[in-house]
Image: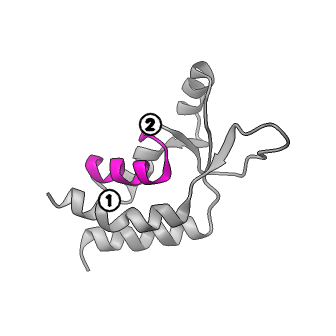
Amino acid sequence: MTAGAVSAVVLTATTASAHFCYFDNPNPKANAGRANSSGFVSFGAIAAMEGFCPAGAEVLADAVGVSTSTMINAHGLMAGPTGGNKAISHLDFGALEAAIPDAIAACEV
């Protein structure tokens, strides 16, 4: 099994039981604080931890509608959206999984 295939299996297995939340339009100061916390990690860092190159991370980020710098809450569940609060979103794991072959291909170029 190639490293990309292993990453694909690990990424989908990890996300199946996870609830990766993020803020749609984060306040820049608050986002800077999140970047220095242990509870948030950038989407690009998550993709890199799973073995994807920067181009592959971009493919995955585009597929789920975030940027590689989007700070993801990888340690807990944030409430929302409630009522009119649409600030909190969750990664679309179906779209993420569908994009994995293209992300692997982007890393093999």
- Give left or right: position of 47 versus 71: left
Range of residues picked out in magenta: 54-68
The residue singled out by tag 1 in the image is 51
Graded by Cα atoms within 10 Å as few (under 14), some (14 to 19) or many (20 or more), the crowding at tag 2 reads some
Nearer to us in this view, 13 or 57: 57
Label 2: element kind = loop
The residue singled out by tag 2 in the image is 69
Pair 1/2: label in front: 2
Q: Where residue 40 sits in the image (x, y, percent)?
A: 57, 41
The image quarter containing residue 15 is bottom right
Colour basis: one colour
The kind of residue on which mark 2 rests is Ser
State how far apart marks 1 and 2 are (Cα): 17 Å
The image quarter containing residue 91 is bottom right
- Give left or right: position of 50 versus 83: left
Q: Where residue 50 sits in the image (x, y, percent)?
A: 38, 60
On screen, residue 25 above or below 75: above
Figure quadrant of the C terminus: bottom left
The image quarter containing residue 7 is bottom left
Q: Main secondary structure of the magenta part?
A: helix
Count the labels in the image: 2
Q: Is residue 31 magenta?
A: no
**Residue at position x 30%, y 54% in the image:** 56
Q: Where residue 11 sits in the image (x, y, percent)?
A: 45, 65
Label 1: element kind = loop
The kind of residue on which mark 1 rests is Gly
- Give left or right: position of 5 versus 41: left
Nearer to us in this view, 41 or 64: 64
